[in-house]
Amino acid sequence: MTATPSAAPGGQPAGQPALQRWRLDISYDGTGFSGWASQPDRRTVQGELEHWLQQVLRLTSPVSLVCAGRTDAGVHARGQVAHVDLPIGAVVDGDALVRRLGRIVPPDVVVRAASRAPEHFDARFGAVWRRYSYRLMDAGAGLDPLMRHHVTRIKEPVDLAALNAAAATLLGLRDFGAFCRRRLGATTIRTLLELSGRRVDSGPLAGSIDVTVRADAFCHSMVRSLIGALVAVGSGRRSLHWLAEVTNGAVRDSSVEVMPAHGLTLEEVRYPADDQLRERAAQARSSREVPAGV
């Protein structure tokens, strides 16, 4: 199979091998990681996988993974997606690569699938939406101790109807600056597609609240801040009026609690049809604005 344009964005320098882009589907328990992104002297998901990929494939040069969503320290993932550009011929069979990695990569991170990426595939900019779950256990309910690293305990009881009423007011395209840690040059305008909570009625998480958060993209700490705001309203500590004022202010508000990382899991990333990947990546890279009147 010959290299595609997506495998060598911008072309390859003279003398460098042609590259083929691969998609990796990844799950990990974030408890033992300092987040996704590589950091000096810290164990990260990206650093772990890049190290073992280079070792397994016996590459002389380091590899670089690009993920759909850079998770913070302690955040888990069931449906993370990443891409990596590898020399043509370094991988022949994706299933074989998965098996080889499974034998040596530590058990708190698993590459579940490896496949040749379609033309113009970009794990980060090609995604249409990301879906997270935040799990919490409120007052009066017993938490399975085996789930303590995946569920956040809170002291007060939560009125689920009040939480969902608050969630409904946040849907749509808007500036979520009130819920984000700003980064220089980065926009905080996002489209929140889904935000709702439900009581889990069976299994090891019975009695807990599972909040689904789905958006085209997220800015830093956005999900955990949104959950913090919903818990504040659902527990009666704050009102819908407070939430509206904070949201409309569109600037980081210290009254919004950032919930602990361990309750959060990246569940799924969705991509468009292959023939729409190039257009989607271009849209994601363009600057966003909130329409007048929104």
Image (cartoon, rainbow, N blue to C red):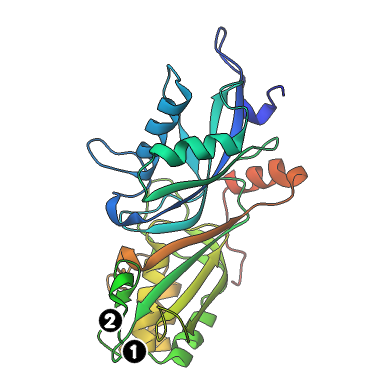
Tell me: 219 left or right of 274.
left
* Camera-side mark, 1 or 2: 2
Label annotation for residue 140: none
Mark 2 neighbour class, 10 Å CA radius: few under 14, some 14 to 19, many 20 or more: some
Query: In the rendering, at what x and y percent does residue 284 appear?
Result: 60, 48
Q: Amino acid at mark 1?
A: Ser
The residue to which callout 1 is attached is 235
Closest to the observer, 270 or 257: 270
Task: Name the spot of residue 72 as percent of width and height, x first.
Answer: 35, 54
Quarter of the figure with the C terminus = bottom right
**Does the rendering let one see residue 248?**
yes
Q: Which residue is mark 2?
A: 154
Which amino acid, mark 2? Ile
Mark 1 crowdedness (10 Å alpha carbons): few <14, some 14-19, many ≥20: some
Q: Quadrant of the N terminus?
A: top right
User: Residue 140: where, in percent of width, then height?
Assistant: 29, 92
Which residue is located at x 45 percent, y 21 percent?
A: 58
As drawn, 59 above or below 149: above
Q: In the image, is 152 to the left or to the right of 277?
A: left
Residue 83, visible in the rendered structure: no
Residue 201 is situated, as x and y percent measured from the top left of the image, at 48, 87
- Residue 253, relative to residue 22: is it above or below? below
Residue at x 45%, y 91% (from the top left corner): 162
Distance from Cα at disc 1 to Cα at disc 2? 10 Å
Q: Residue furthest left?
A: 41
Q: Nearer the viewer, residue 191 or 23?
A: 23
Marks 1 and 2: CB-CB under 8 Å? yes
Which structural element holds mark 2?
A: loop
Residue drawn at 32 percent across, 78 percent down: 144
